[in-house]
Image (spheres, rainbow, N blue to C red):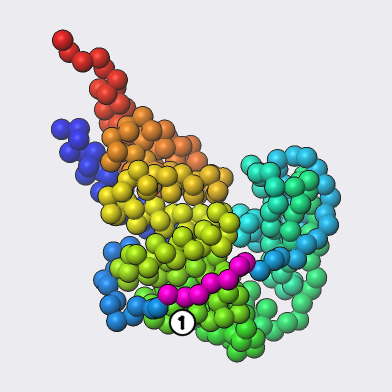
Amino acid sequence: MIKMTTGAVRTRLSVCARLLLQLFYASPLALFIAFSLNVAAPHAPAQKNKKKPARARTTAAPTTTKKTPSATAKTITVRTEPNAVIWFDEVRRGAANESGQLEIAKVSPGRHTLRVRAAGFAERTLSLLPAERGALTIPLTRTDDAAELAFQQAEAARDKATTDEARRQVAELYRRALALRPKFPAAHVGLARVLLDLNDYEAALAEIDAARAGRPAYAEASAVEGRILRATSETQAAIEAYERAIREARGFQPEAHTGLGLIYEEEGRHAEAAAAFRQAVAQLSDTEPVLYELLGRVYERLEKYKEAVAAYEKYLTLAPNGKLAPAIQSVVEQLRKQAAEQDAPPLD
């Protein structure tokens, strides 16, 4: 009786989780990054006439370096313009508060990249050396670049678009930026994300091609390509795109790890799905609670009930008032009983 109830709840969770994952992907992880998480329905009908040939790739382009204050802390506190959006290793980590400050915790050793964007200012990308930790002040410069300003307007509007009409308006903002600056890879990727939301897969893939023409090795473009191909049921091509994204990002691409996890789960490869979701969780540093629901779900299917409980409880800790919280709490109670049964000594 417990198993049937768990399965029913899990089905409802699956639908909710995928809806939340759409929101996660709406903001690139970045990924989220999104995880991110703006995807078409995971089981959208196949578009067999819209397959694209494999694309050639080259090595990733270097980022601009910038000297900033040094510290040995494992946390970085960015000080910049109020409400500036901040990416860390191409994963969107949030926006600065009204004082222009955002803390990034759990920074691993080694080099990292930091990208900062604020409305009305020129975007900045910096390469951080291993010793550059602690408080980093990132001043921005005002810009009158019409293409940059149109792009910023499109990005802000995409975060808020919840209807197809709003998304079509966002697409026009991206096209305005591209009319002013045709070689604008980030604008092509942003437009591809919107077109994916509108289920215009062929046009979305064309924007990915255009982005790569200006930036041949582009991890975010490859991750979005994977999502488009997955939406059209081109599973193997989607896997290849996600794996390419991970290579281009030197392993750090939570949007692609999440995409791979979803494909593996759909194919019944639950152990591989769990590994992919764990990678995404580690790279997003607990900024996307829905990943713990995905991880808990595959642990259930592996009958690793203790691990499933731990994953679901982590979701509840991070999002106690989340939309999935009531259903997950119900699942947790049942899984605890199943875990106890697994641990019980066999009857003689």
Q: Amino acid at mark 1?
A: Ala
Mostly what secondary structure, the magenta segment? loop
Quarter residue 236 falls in: bottom left
Query: Is 335 on the left-hand or right-hand side of 185?
Result: left
Q: Residue at x 42, y 82 (%)?
A: 203
Residue 55 inside the magenta-drawn segment: yes
Specify few, some or many for label 1: CA neighbours under 10 Å numbering under 14, 14-19, or 20 or more: some
Q: How many marks?
A: 1
Residue found farthest to the bottom: 179
Q: Residue at x 27, y 24 (%)?
A: 342
Q: Residue at x 25, y 22 (%)?
A: 341
Residue 15: x percent and y percent? Answer: 30, 54
Which secondary structure, mark 1? helix
Q: Is residue 278 visible?
A: yes
Along the line of sight, the residue nearer the viewer: 122 or 268: 268
Q: Quadrant of the C terminus?
A: top left
Along the line of sight, the residue nearer the viewer: 168 or 51: 51
Residue 149: x percent and y percent? Answer: 67, 78
Query: Is 54 on the left-hand or right-hand side of 150?
Result: left
In the image, the segment drawn in magenta is: 54-60
Q: Is 304 above or below relative to 141?
A: above
Q: Residue at x 62, y 83 (%)?
A: 183
Residue 154: x percent and y percent? Answer: 57, 76
Query: Is 156 on the left-hand or right-hand side of 301?
Result: right
Q: Is 184 above or below relative to 104?
A: below
Residue found farthest to the top: 348
Residue 238: x percent and y percent? Answer: 39, 65
Along the line of sight, the residue nearer the viewer: 319 or 103: 103
Q: Is residue 293 visible?
A: no
Quarter residue 85 falls in: bottom right
Label 1: which residue? 206
